Image (cartoon, helix red, strand yellow):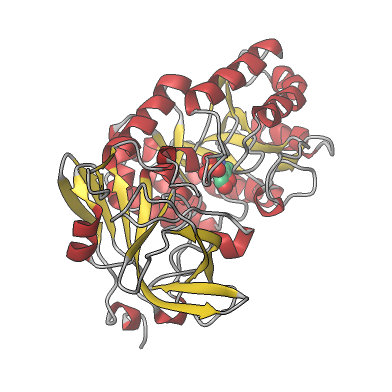
Amino acid sequence: MSALPRELLPDNSTVAADGRLSVGGCDLLGLAAEFGTPVFVYDEAHLRARCREAVAAFGDGVAYATKAFLCTAMARLAHEEGMVLDVATGGELHVALAAGVPADRLVLHGNNKSAAELARALEVGVGRIVVDSFDEVDRLERLAPGAAHRPQVLVRVTPGVEAHTHEYVRTGQDDSKFGFGLRSGAAGQAVERLGALASVDLVGLHAHIGSQVFVVDSFFHAVEAMAPFVNAQGLPELSIGGGLGVAYVEGESAPSITEWAGAVRAACVDAGITAQVSAEPGRAIVAAAALTLYTVGTVKDLPGIRTYVAVDGGMSDNPRPVLYGSGYETFLPRATDADRDRPVRVVGKHCESGDLLVAEARVPADLAVGDVLATPVTGAYGHSMGSNYNKVPRPPVVFVKDGDARLVVRRETDDDLLRLDL
Ligand SMILES: Cc1ncc(COP(=O)(O)O)c(C=O)c1O
């Protein structure tokens, strides 16, 4: 029975002779004792290395998609490492600005940007606005002429390509709430309308085909589908969005950011695209940098059926298993390399039968109540998609590096749960 594959751990992980795991020089059981559980632990050097890799691979202008994981520390880190930040709402814009990221290093996305969100973007002067609908063109036409900054805009195009990924995270197909269809002619009309607006600069095109895409061919098809349109428009910029997949479980493997960029660039060269090509990875920057630590609270054996191992978090800190049926591995950081020969289901503490974290988990046979249990590769779309369901306070976020543990988001308190009530 297999031990946890080491490649699912953050870059700077070490296992002591007694089997205990440290990340960024910090012993995980020590972190669980100091900060409590559940807790998100991020390997800061891993985050920085992925940001640098993205900048080296795509050049200046490559954006970190903050929806994957955002707090002020993460915004600052991505900015320090030379990335632009992609924000998809006024809320993400607010956090990025509060972190001190200059507005001209931000790209604003969103399929339904409100007039207030657009007005704020124009007031602070965000670097790029990716326009997603004709209603948004109308809003820009109204708001941009009196604005403090002249916006540089891209048109979001749905290239009509089906990425090989979960239906809920596919965005490139014709039937999508995002962007302007290529086949329908809507993308052409959007370019015409924005090109004719004196108060905006139309600088490029954008396409995002989906998330957790493992097959580089999907990006190749997107570039191929976009090329005639891109070349006909002759605009200087093209973003191919994010979507690079990461390995979550044993046996999965994904291209690196460098390999992805190489494949995209080669596809663009083949297609005769001369626009400056960029991208917006989210998951590939942050997912594998983190793991979540929980404490086992109950172990319920149902003879002949299964064993339920319940931890002190669940769908409120990681909704991906419930939303997408996503798989994770799990292990005990006190015995990192131990064989995991006991089949169990790891569930949370929420009042939902669907509240599971790892449906078909394997754990060491001696797992017991009180153990700290870890799920690796939880750095993306866990904290950011988390909730307060059942009034469970959100976990803290700790960045670890060179033996130092830095609390960057504190744990919510019970009083925080009341802060909005009047
Ligand atoms: C427009 C856009 N860019 C980038 C991303 C980031 O995707 P990922 O985290 O899969 O790289 C998304 C994700 O939904 C997106 O919608």
Front residue (pair 146, 303): 303
Front residue (pair 328, 317): 328
Residue 69: % across, % down:
41, 51
Q: Is residue 162 above or below residue 42?
A: above
Left or right, residue 38 beside residue 28: right
Q: Residue furthest bottom?
A: 422
Residue 356: % across, % down:
54, 68
Left or right, residue 55 beside residue 354: left
Q: Quadrant of residue 16?
A: top left
Query: At 51% across and 35% down in the image, what residue appears?
Result: 280
Q: Quadrant of residue 393?
A: bottom left
Query: At 51% across and 78% down in the image, what residue appears?
Result: 301
Residue 375: % across, % down:
42, 56
Query: At 25% across and 50% down in the image, what residue appears?
Result: 20
Left or right, residue 272 beside residue 334: right
Can the viewer see residue 400 in this picture?
A: yes
Residue 86: % across, % down:
46, 42
Front residue (pair 321, 178): 321
Ligand 1 appears in which quadrant?
top right
Q: Is residue 198 above or below residue 21?
A: above
Can the viewer see residue 282 in this picture?
A: no
Front residue (pair 298, 144): 298
Q: Quadrant of the C terminus?
A: bottom left
